[in-house]
Each structure stands twice: as structure tokens, then as C-alpha cells.
């Protein structure tokens, strides 16, 4: 006979956390590939002439750094929480 397998609340929460992290990576990879395809399709010549980061102002760099900071904090906290359990 097949035994019923019961999951505790913590096990289900761990599975959800792993799913969230995997989904985060999937979205990040898809977004990067999609963005590169769009740049190649519409701005290929401008990128080849002047470079990829042409026209980036200080405000744009600040927004980019803030977004990267949020991603790094999320990944560190997520790995810390998973490792504690």
C-alpha cells in the first residue's frame, strides 16, 4: 500500500521560497535576453558607433545602483533564512 505523505507547514514554506527564488532567476534571465534582442533589433548601429552606455546620466546610474542593491539584499536575506532552517 502506498503511504500518505504529510507535509509540515515549514516544508511547504521552504518549497514556496525555493520556487520564488527560481522564478526570480527565470524572470531575470528572460528579461536580460529579451532586452538584448530589442537592443540588437532597434539600436544596433547606435550601440556599435557610440557604445552601449551612451547618454546615461547620473540619475540613471543612481536608479540602476538602487535596483541592484535591492536584488543583492533580497538574495542575501533569502539565503540566510533558508540556511537557518
Image (cartoon, grey):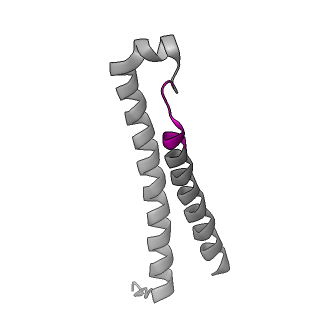
The answer to which image quadrant residue 70 occupies is: bottom right
How many numbered tags mark residues here?
Answer: 0
User: In what quadrant of the picture does the C terminus appear?
Assistant: bottom right
Asked whether residue 27 is in view, the answer is: yes
Asked whether residue 8 is in view, the answer is: no
Residue at 43%, 85% (x, y): give it.
5
Residue 47 magenta: no
In percent of width and height, residue 32 lies at 45, 38
Residue at 44%, 80% (x, y): give it.
12
**Does residue 45 sit above or below 82 in this rendering?**
above
In percent of width and height, residue 17 lies at 48, 71
**Does residue 68 sit above or below 5 in this rendering?**
above
User: In what quadrant of the picture does the N terminus appear?
Assistant: bottom left
Return the residue found at the far front.
58
Query: On the picture, is 29 further left or further right than 41?
Result: right
Q: Which residues are magenta?
A: 54-61
Residue at 50%, 67% (x, y): give it.
18
The answer to which image quadrant residue 43 occupies is: top left
In percent of width and height, residue 23 lies at 42, 57
In percent of width and height, residue 79 lies at 62, 68
Residue at 53%, 19% (x, y): give it.
51
Q: Who is closer to the viewer here, 32 or 7?
A: 32
Amino acid at each position: 500500500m502506498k503511504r500518505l505523505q504529510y507535509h509540515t507547514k515549514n516544508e511547504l514554506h521552504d518549497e514556496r521560497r525555493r520556487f520564488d527564488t527560481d522564478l526570480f532567476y527565470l524572470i531575470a534571465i528572460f528579461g536580460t535576453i529579451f532586452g538584448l534582442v530589442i537592443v540588437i533589433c532597434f539600436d544596433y548601429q547606435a550601440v556599435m558607433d557610440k557604445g552601449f552606455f551612451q547618454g546615461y546620466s547620473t540619475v540613471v546610474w543612481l536608479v540602476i545602483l538602487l535596483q541592484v542593491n535591492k536584488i543583492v539584499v533580497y538574495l542575501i536575506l533569502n539565503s540566510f533564512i533558508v540556511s537557518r532552517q
